[in-house]
Image: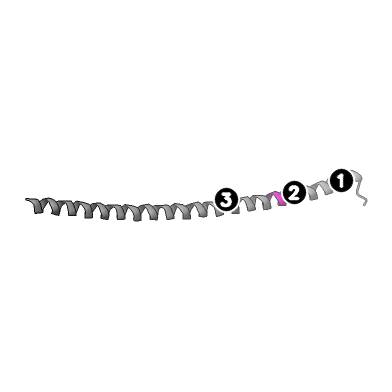
Amino acid sequence: MSISRSQCAGQKNIAKSGAGTQNRIEVAGKKNAALFEWAAFVKAEKSELVLRVTQYSESARASAQSTLSARWRSLSLRH
């Protein structure tokens, strides 16, 4: 049984289509991997920022308490 030109061309188009689909899947996979990598980076940066703000807040609170205690003592000594 022989294959006509149109059947042969159709088979080539199917093969090309399959390769194109595979290529699109690979590109989509790479894009998803890049997005996951970016999301992990942003999450890590956010965690670092939260940690720094928390440490700063604790430091500022301790400093404010120390200042208030010193002022209270100085006022108490005056009376």
Q: Residue at x 39, y 54 (%)?
A: 52
Under mark 1, the amino acid is Ala
- Categorize mark 3 by other alpha carbons within 10 Å: few (<14), some (14-19), many (20+): few
The kind of secondary structure the magenta stretch mainly shows is helix
Residue positioned 67% across, 50% down in the render: 27
In the rendered image, residue 46, in percent from the top left (x then y), is placed at 44, 52
Percent from the top left, x then y, of residue 47? 43, 54
The residue mark sitting in front, 1 or 3, is: 3
Residue type at the position of mark 2: Gly
Q: What numbered label is drawn on residue 32?
A: none
Nearest to N terminus: mark 1 or mark 3: 1
Q: Position of residue 41 (x, y in %)?
A: 51, 54
Which residue in the rendered view is the most extreme toward the left? Answer: 79
Name the residue that disc number 1 marks.
9
- Distance CA(mark 2)–CA(mark 1): 16 Å
Task: Name the residue beneath numbered marker 2.
Answer: 20
Residue 31, x across and y down, in percent: 62, 50
Segment colored magenta: 19-24
The secondary structure type at the circle numbered 1 is helix
Q: Is residue 42 left or right of residue 75?
A: right
Q: Earlier in the sequence, mark 3 or mark 2?
A: 2
Q: Nearer the viewer, residue 8 or 25?
A: 25
Local packing at callout 2 (Cα closer than 10 Å; few below 14, some 14-19, many 20+) is: few
Callouts 3 and 2 close, C-beta under 8 Å: no
In the rendered image, residue 22 lying in the magenta stretch gets the answer: yes
Q: Amino acid at mark 3?
A: Leu
